[in-house]
Amino acid sequence: MTEIGIGIIGGGYMGKAHAAAYGSVATLFDTALRPRLEMVCASSDASATAYQKAFGFARSTADWRELVNDAGVEAIIIAAPQNTHRDIALAAFALGKPVFCEKPLGATLADSIAMNDAAGGCINMVGFNYIRTPASQYARRLVAEGRIGDVTYFRGEHTEDFLADGTLPGTWRTQGMANGTMGDLAPHMINGARALIGPITSLCASVETVHAKRGDQDVTNDDQAQMMCRFENGAHGHLFFSRVATGRKMGYAYEIHGTKGSIRFDQEDQNALHLYTMDGPEAERGFRKILTGPAHPDYLPFCQGPGHGTGYQDQIIIEAKDFLTAIATNTNIWPTFSEGLEVNRVVTAAIDSSTKNAWVNVADY
């Protein structure tokens, strides 16, 4: 098994998740490449050194340029703030290095376009982890195989309540649109809708700030948003995103209606998928709960027991497996920067739609 040096920029919430994933992925999936935690970068020498010791990296730095240019770093994971993504990715691609970038791809649509253009022939991937649960991968398969017929309607949400308390003080999360709900939560469900149903062609959105002031700080981004949309295949949809949805902790949820059946999923119960098909007598029809197990995508490497389940960290490990496979085969694996760009295009269209209070065509952005 060939080793590959991994450099992670950002050691916080997602940096830690990726470090843990790359430390275990080769054992679980027997990948052709075995990751070596080579270097971690953080905002100061002290924090970088702390992450190095905590996560098991060989070296650390407070300068992302040093990490990108280091010969021992052969693949780069960007888990830093959105406004850093563009410069880091462009520098890495100029050296021909593979890049995995956390969502949203760029802080702006212009950033995402530049990053996608710069990727060229380099391996690239964007971090949409929730669509990788065994249950959602199976849902994609059911839809693609026509199990529920032609899709007529999709309802999706990504709702959490970490800022539901209006008395909480302002932080970096309440400053700048890239850190608002449309920049933070919406990309996941927009990606999910695109993965399950297909491209969104037009939409009408409403984006709002519920708590305009936190302490003595003015809030400069959005708390929640909703949009009606039409998909390329003719299906209609409604998407809702919120960081103030009281009681919701991980409300990445969707419902898909087709001409022959329906599918329901909720990330708070991520190891179950609910399927309805128009089979048998009417008196016996109803949703049935499918517990994920070894028969579902990417489940068996974690556990041999059906219903035992996978968790959040396992989604990140699945991402790591896909990224390493893409590098080993020199073939990009979805979701690439192109998907990140298209998600950002929908976000941009939705914000503009809300400003105009009108339907807009996504292709115009």
Image: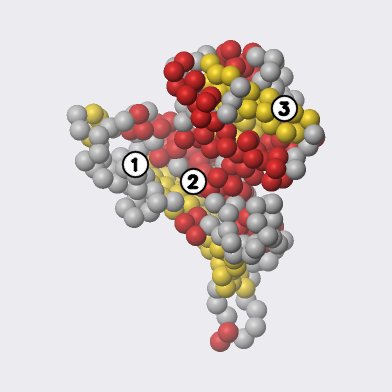
Residue 231 visible, this orientation: no
Q: Position of residue 337 (x, y in %)?
A: 63, 32
The label shown at residue 4 is 3
Question: Which percent across, then down, holds residue 102?
Answer: 55, 33
Q: Position of residue 111 (x, y in %)?
A: 54, 24
Depth order, front residue of 313/37: 37
Q: Which badge, 1 or 2, comes first in the chain's sequence?
A: 2
The mark that comes first in sequence, 1 or 3, is: 3
The secondary element bearing badge 2 is classed as strand
Left/right placement of residue 319 relative to residue 223 reads right
Residue at mark 1: 223
User: Would you identify the image quadrant in which residue 40 lies?
Assistant: top right
Residue farthest to the left?
A: 216
Q: Is residue 123 visible?
A: yes
Q: Is residue 73 above or below residue 296?
A: above
Observer-side mark, 1 or 2, equals 1
Marks 1/3: CA distance? 40 Å
Residue with the mark numbered 2? 203
Which badge, 2 or 3, is on the more N-terminal residue? Answer: 3
Q: Write the residue at 52% across / 44% down.
A: 188
Kind of residue indicated by mark 3: Ile
Disc 2 marks which amino acid? Leu
- Residue placed at 49% from the left, 46% from the top? 203
Amino acid type at circle 1 is: Asp
